[in-house]
């Protein structure tokens, strides 16, 4: 699931700092302007999601699961959120703030960008 703050003050330039959730909030900032909730595989201390290309065995499977969630579930949900926000907000600063910016390109959250834009 993807949650976006639509905002009611058109003069507000502050962008939401997105957080990750696996039912409960994680101490992870995604760098995206939306919040992301999914059934991520978490590290044992519940501080981050499993991610990395240098893992083997169970760690690699957990990392692949999270990558699949981001590209196959979160990206399409984010695209649908943007489509709904476009209907609600129209072409406005509040709408354009919902798009990821260059500073949000940190892994693993940057994995959603190619499928997000191909879904739009």
Image: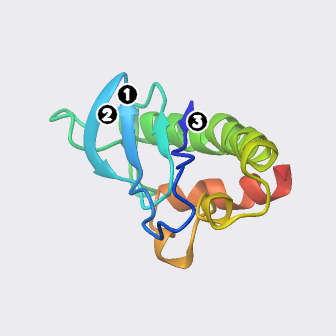
For the residues labelled 1 and 2, the Cα–Cα distance comes to: 8 Å
- Give the residue drawn at x 78%, y 59%: 117
Q: Earlier in the sequence, mark 1 or mark 2?
A: 1
Between tags 1 and 2, which lies in front?
1
Residues packed near mark 1 inside 10 Å, few (<14), some (14 to 19) or many (20 plus):
some
Instruction: Tell me the quarter of the image containing the N terminus.
Output: top right
Between tags 3 and 1, which lies in front?
1
| Residues at marks 1 and 2 touching, judged by CB atoms closer than 8 Å | yes
- Give the residue drawn at x 75%, y 43%: 88
Check disc 1 and report the residue beneath it: 22
Which is more toward the observer, 75 or 12? 12
Total numbered circles: 3
Residues packed near mark 2 inside 10 Å, few (<14), some (14 to 19) or many (20 plus):
some
Q: Is residue 73 above or below residue 105?
A: above
For the residues labelled 3 and 1, the Cα–Cα distance comes to: 12 Å
Of helix, strand and loop, which one carries label 1?
strand
Q: Earlier in the sequence, mark 3 or mark 2?
A: 2
Which is more toward the observer, 111 or 92? 92
Check disc 3 and report the residue beneath it: 69
Of helix, strand and loop, which one carries label 2?
loop
Q: Which mark is residue 42?
A: 2
Percent position of residue 73, x then y? 66, 34
- Give the residue drawn at x 48%, y 68%: 104
Quadrant location of residue 62?
A: top left
Q: Earlier in the sequence, mark 3 or mark 1?
A: 1
Q: Is residue 53 left or right of residue 2?
A: left
């Amino acid at each position: 699931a993807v949650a976006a703050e639509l905002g009611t003050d058109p003069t507000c330039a502050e962008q939401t700092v997105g957080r990750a959730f696996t039912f409960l909030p994680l101490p992870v900032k995604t760098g995206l302007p939306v919040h992301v909730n999914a059934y991520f595989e978490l590290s044992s201390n519940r501080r981050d999601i499993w991610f990395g290309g240098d893992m083997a065995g169970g760690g690699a499977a957990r990392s692949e699961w999270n990558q699949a969630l981001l590209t196959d579930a979160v990206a399409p949900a984010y695209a649908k959120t943007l489509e709904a926000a476009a209907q609600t907000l129209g072409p406005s600063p509040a709408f354009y703030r919902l798009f990821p910016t260059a500073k949000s390109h940190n892994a693993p959250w940057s994995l959603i960008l190619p499928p997000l834009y191909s879904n739009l």
